[in-house]
Image (cartoon, rainbow, N blue to C red):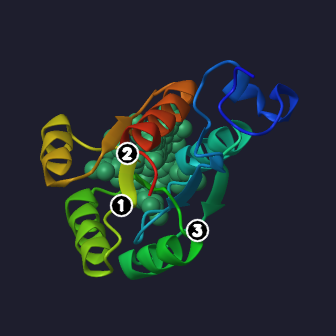
Amino acid sequence: MENDGALGDRALPPARKENIPMTTESKVIRVLVAKVGLDGHDRGVKIVARTLRDAGMEVIYTGLHRTPEEVVDAAVQEDVDVIGISILSGAHMTVFPRLLKLLDERGAKDIMVVGGGVIPDDEVIQLKNLGVKEIMLQDTPPDSIVAMIRRIVVERGPR
Ligand code: B12
């Protein structure tokens, strides 16, 4: 048998047959998508959540006005692979460092943090240096977001 599991080829999810990594170790990728603080811009986050769900991932959307603590609590409880923050308020230099610190304190640094929205280019570089895995800004094609999440989960490997 050519595939790597005990199951026959028909049992594999479609993406796996095409050799596109949808899962790690047969586990569906889990993503918590969140809005933090007073930011009420929710068009982008809804597109991201729907796109990832349609791509076969398990997506939890927190809704608006969460605190970093609430996001990290939910991410740990839900055992997600990735936290995706959509932020257009300008508070990104406060929110992302706080999330990374809380994940560290909870011993949950294997949960990766990505972001998108409105963030100046120089601050994208600073945030990546702090540990934000990827940031994708306005006009990013939804397929690129799916591909990025799959790539970082595969690169991280099994937990
Ligand atoms: C529509 C809009 C609104 C709508 C929001 C409606 C809604 N329910 O979302 C309304 C009119 C309510 C509004 C209000 C305000 N707005 Co407004 N708004 C915009 C506008 C014009 C478009 C935003 C949008 O919907 N884009 C379409 C979506 C699909 O794109 P997106 O969110 O960027 O998402 C894409 C990517 O960023 C990425 N992405 C997004 N999230 C994530 C997450 C992850 C994990 C990943 C990987 C990728 C990703 O993928 C998406 C697809 O490509 C922007 C200008 C702009 N160019 O962005 C200003 C803008 C965001 N608003 C702005 C401001 C100032 C305000 C107000 C404060 C204005 C005021 N004084 O009242 C209020 C704040 C309201 C609030 N409570 O937060 C500023 C923010 C400035 C800043 N950050 O420094 C902007 C940038 C306008 C400007 N140039 O000044 N706004």
Foreground pick, 73 / 150: 150
Indicate left or right for 92 with 17 as reference.
left
Q: Of the two numbered discs 2 and 3 on the same chain, state the one appearing first in sequence.
A: 3
How far across and how far down the image is residue 10, in percent? 87, 28
Q: Which residue is mark 2?
A: 156
* Residue depicted at 48% across the width and 63% down the height: 35
Secondary structure of the residue carrying tag 3 is loop
Q: Tell me if I can see residue 117 in this picture.
A: no
Indicate left or right for 8 with 82 as reference.
right
Name the kind of residue labelled 2 in the image: Arg
Q: Which residue is mark 1?
A: 110
* Residue depicted at 83% across the width and 31% down the height: 8
Which of the 4 image quadrants contains residue 21?
A: top right
* Residue depicted at 39% across the width and 81% down the height: 69
Secondary structure of the residue carrying tag 1 is loop
> Considering the image in quadrants, where does the C terminus appear?
bottom left
CA separation, marks 3 and 1? 20 Å
Q: Are marks 2 and 1 in contact (CB under 8 Å)?
A: yes
Q: Any atom of ligand 1 within 8 Å of the CB at mark 3?
A: no
Q: Which residue is mark 3?
A: 62
How far across and how far down the image is residue 136, in percent? 38, 36
Above or below for 145 versus 81? above
